[in-house]
Image (spheres, rainbow, N blue to C red):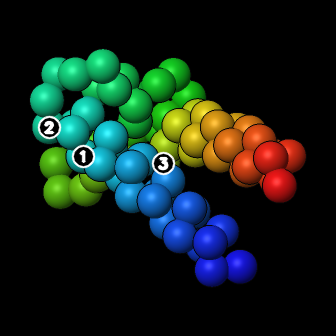
Amino acid sequence: MGKTLMIAGAILFGMGLLFYLGARFEGPFSWLGRLPGDIRIEKENFSFYLPITTSILISLILSGLFYLISRMR
């Protein structure tokens, strides 16, 4: 259980780092968070952002990774 939590934490840290660097620089992951299907509403004193497509993509990637990890045991 501890090993699985450490692996999951490392994956989440890596994805967070990619998001941070992708938003900060024009790098290979700058498209994350700006996919078609992500809802962005910006008004004068209000902004709302709901990354639906990005969330689905990340969910698919993580599901695949966890499936591969479970098959290696």
The reply to whether residue 41 is in sight is: no
Residue 68 locus on image (x, y percent): 77, 42
The answer to which image quadrant residue 40 occupies is top left
CA gap, disc 1 and disc 3? 17 Å
Disc 3 marks a residue whose amino acid type is: Leu
Residue 45 locus on image (x, y percent): 17, 57
- Tag 3's secondary structure? strand
CA gap, disc 2 and disc 1? 6 Å
The answer to which image quadrant residue 61 occupies is top right
Against 23, is 26 above or below? Answer: above
| Residue bearing the label numbered 2 | 24
Residue 25 locus on image (x, y percent): 13, 29
Going from N to C along the chain, the mark reached first, 1 or 3, is: 1
- Tag 2's secondary structure? helix
| Residue bearing the label numbered 1 | 20
| Residue bearing the label numbered 3 | 50
Against 17, is 32 above or below? Answer: above
- Tag 1's secondary structure? helix
Residue 42 locus on image (x, y percent): 28, 43
The residue nearer to you, when weighing 52 against 14, is 14
Going from N to C along the chain, the mark reached first, 2 or 3, is: 2
Number of residues whose C-alpha sits closer than 10 Å to that of mark 1, classed few (under 14), some (14–19) or many (20 or more): few
Number of residues whose C-alpha sits closer than 10 Å to that of mark 3, classed few (under 14), some (14–19) or many (20 or more): few
- The reply to whether discs 2 and 1 touch (Cβ–Cβ < 8 Å) is yes
Left or right of 27 on screen, residue 68: right
